[in-house]
Amino acid sequence: MMILTCVMAFAQEEVVDYLNVGKTLKFQGKKFELKWCQHQNEAVYLQEWLPEGETFDNYGQMLTVTLFFSEAGTVQYVENMAQILEKRKKTDCAYYYVHEKDGEYVIDFLVLDSAGGKVNFAEVGINHCKPVIVNGKKAVQINLYTRRAYGDDINPFLESLDDKTDDWINELTQMNIICKMK
């Protein structure tokens, strides 16, 4: 779902590490490579990493870091994400949970994309939203891990979620991703 993901930029030639997070990240023992970035304006930066060999056409896993410079804070982002997921419920099977601890939020969601009357993929997303200060400016940093399954892999994927989701949340919230602007 990563609705925020603009996958139209496949042809992008240069991938810039605007956030100075690194060209590679490690998650769940896998190396992820920076494959896409977007710097829409001075307020929004978005970067996406995929495991080696995966493409945006049919990815199984993705890490995303988004930085919003805003006075609104994390609560505004969480409310917006909840609205997006509520809208998604009108066309697809979608569930989400919001957890808050010490001003940081985790939104974990499950979406079954059913465009065309069949389930095309199942997607779990773990959003870790936290307030940060970057170069003296207030911002919201969202670290997102997305996991997808397609076709015959959907049912085994769904059956395995109880065992994996807590691990994904714990690892994502413990990642020391610090955005730095030059």
Image (cartoon, rainbow, N blue to C red):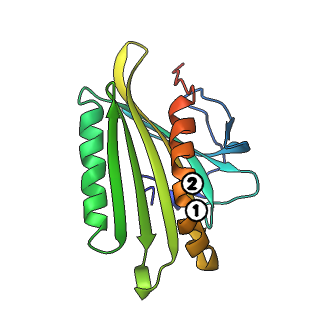
**Percent x, y for residue 60?**
63, 61
Report the quarter where the C terminus lies: top right
Quarter-of-image position of residue 14: top right
Q: Which residue is mark 1?
A: 160
Residue 1 position within the rendered picture, expressed as x and y whole percent measured from the top left: 45, 61
* Residue at image mark 2: 163
Viewer-side residue, 122 vs 34: 122
Q: Disc 2 marks which amino acid?
A: Asp
Tell me if 75 is positioned left or right of 59 in this view. left
Q: Residue furthest front?
A: 163
Q: Is residue 43 left or right of residue 27?
A: left
Amino acid, disc 1 = Ser
Q: 48 above or below 112?
A: above
Mark 1 burial class by Cα count in 10 Å: few <14, some 14-19, many 20+: few
- Whether tag 2 and tag 1 are in contact, CB under 8 A, the answer is yes
For the residue pair 133 and 148, the one nearer the viewer reads as: 148
Q: CA distance from mark 2 to mark 1?
A: 6 Å
Counting from the top left corner in percent of width and height, residue 22 is at: 66, 30
